[in-house]
Image: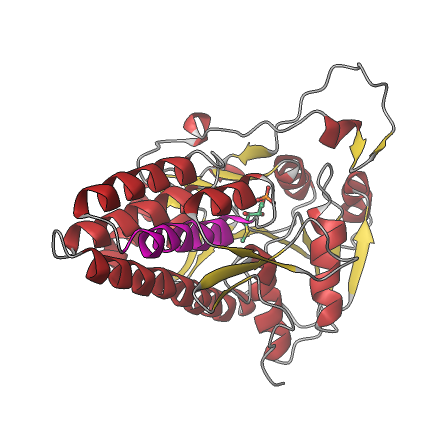
């Protein structure tokens, strides 16, 4: 089967600007927003125009590049002040997905390696680095897809949570990338997509993406997953990740943890597909991962439709942590780490340095 080519771009560089598909409007409307500064990209990340860990990282890299281009006719001192505040505003946009901080650290390294004082050359170099981060993400997803596809049996029924597709990355996707690659390899696959309350990434984005590619997808309410597992209707679970601690604990969209617990109960393999840029070796275990809490209105209702009592107390943590012991395997661009733990992850990271 021929490879899938997305009919949309999550982000694209166009005439000196960054364009991002407005994921808040999908699937009803396909519209792009154009960005010219780091501050506006940070708003786009915070407001969920773009979301998904690797896509957020790519957007942040382009945010830095945009700011550098905006400042390229200024003095070296003004350029430095402008870029320092660009890094700051982007780093404050969302807390959990480590790809954001990984991309910013990469961009800072590149900046530091530029000729000091040559503002124009630095801007060109930073734009080039952003393009590289973008293309490397697609390549990593393709590799993950190849490794992951080998784990999937022909005819498998796969459950996924949230959206870890092309929309959450520069292209192809992590969890959905594995599914796409398995289909490309000729396997007959069907997918159950958790709707993923409160922001409905599964219902709005995963269902839409898979339907675009003609991959059979069935949407379920989040709380139907256990029932389907108990009836033997799910063979394997694949999700993405926002941050993986050094011991293999995985932060991903809230609700992932309960899916993993149910998977263990029903002896269903639970895989996490994520690039190395999602591993945070600085954090020993999941308890240290910052968990974003978002607006109460996301839980009281959706968009303008608010169905809960206006004044009801709400908690809205949007990520949770799945302990490594519940993870059957970590699918990365360097291969699959079965039963991940601190030692195996350190070894994986060492092999990346070689
Ligand atoms: O709040 P979101 O939509 O940014 O959360 C996204 C997820 O939790 C994804 O599963 C994760 O980023 C992996 S995307 C390849």
Dominant secondary structure, magenta: helix
Residue 253 visible in the picture: yes
Instruction: Tell me, yes or no, whether the highlighted magenta stretch contains residue 17.
Output: no
Question: On the picture, is 42 further left or further right than 86?
Answer: right
Applied colour scheme: secondary structure
The quadrant of the rendering that contains the C terminus is: bottom left
The residue positioned farthest toward the left in the image shown: 116
Q: What residue lies at 44% left-to-right and 49% top-to-bottom?
A: 37
The percent position of residue 146, horizontal first and vertical second, equals 49, 71
| Near-viewer residue (246 or 71) | 71
Q: What residue lies at 77% left-to-right and 41% top-to-bottom?
A: 222
Seen in the picture, residue 201 relative to 305 is either above or below; the reply is below
Q: What residue lies at 64% left-to-right and 54% top-to-bottom?
A: 22
Question: On the picture, is 310 further left or further right than 297?
Answer: right
| Near-viewer residue (292 or 119) | 119
Residue 354 visible in the picture: no
Seen in the picture, residue 145 relative to 194 is either above or below; the reply is below
| Near-viewer residue (217 or 258) | 217
Instruction: Tell me, yes or no, whether the highlighted magenta stretch contains residue 69.
Output: yes
The percent position of residue 121, horizontal first and vertical second, equals 20, 62
Q: What residue lies at 42% left-to-right and 69% top-to-bottom?
A: 139
Over which residues does the magenta segment extend? Answer: 52-72
């Amino acid at each position: 089967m021929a490879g899938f080519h997305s009919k949309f771009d999550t982000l694209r560089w166009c005439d000196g600007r960054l364009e991002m598909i407005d994921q808040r409007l999908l699937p009803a409307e396909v519209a792009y927003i154009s960005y010219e500064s780091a501050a506006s990209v940070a708003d786009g990340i915070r407001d969920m125009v773009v979301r998904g860990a690797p896509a957020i990282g790519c957007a942040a890299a382009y945010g830095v590049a945009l700011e550098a281009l905006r400042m390229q006719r200024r003095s070296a001192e003004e350029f430095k002040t402008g870029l320092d505040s660009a890094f700051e505003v982007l780093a404050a946009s969302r807390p959990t997905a480590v790809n954001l901080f990984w991309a910013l650290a990469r961009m800072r390294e590149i900046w530091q390696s530029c000729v000091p004082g040559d503002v124009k050359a630095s801007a060109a170099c930073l734009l080039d680095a952003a393009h590289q981060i973008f293309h490397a993400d697609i390549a990593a997803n393709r590799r993950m897809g190849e490794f992951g596809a080998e784990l999937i049996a022909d005819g498998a029924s796969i459950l996924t949570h949230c959206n870890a597709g092309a929309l959450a990355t520069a292209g192809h996707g992590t969890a959905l990338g594995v599914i796409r690659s398995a289909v490309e390899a000729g396997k007959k696959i069907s997918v159950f997509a958790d709707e993923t309350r409160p922001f409905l990434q599964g219902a709005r984005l995963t269902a839409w993406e898979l339907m675009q590619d003609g991959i059979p997808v069935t949407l379920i309410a989040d709380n139907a997953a256990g029932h389907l597992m108990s009836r033997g209707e799910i063979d394997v679970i694949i999700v993405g990740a926002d941050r993986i601690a050094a011991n293999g604990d995985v932060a991903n969209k809230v609700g992932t943890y309960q899916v993993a617990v149910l998977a263990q109960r029903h002896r269903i393999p639970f895989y996490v597909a994520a690039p190395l840029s999602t591993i945070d070796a600085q954090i020993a275990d999941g308890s240290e991962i910052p968990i974003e809490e978002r607006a109460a209105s996301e839980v009281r209702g959706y968009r303008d439709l608010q169905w809960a009592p206006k004044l009801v107390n709400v908690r809205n943590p949007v990520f949770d942590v799945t302990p490594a012991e519940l993870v059957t395997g970590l699918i990365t661009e360097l291969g699959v780490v079965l039963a991940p733990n601190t030692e195996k992850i350190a070894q994986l990271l060492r092999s990346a340095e070689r």
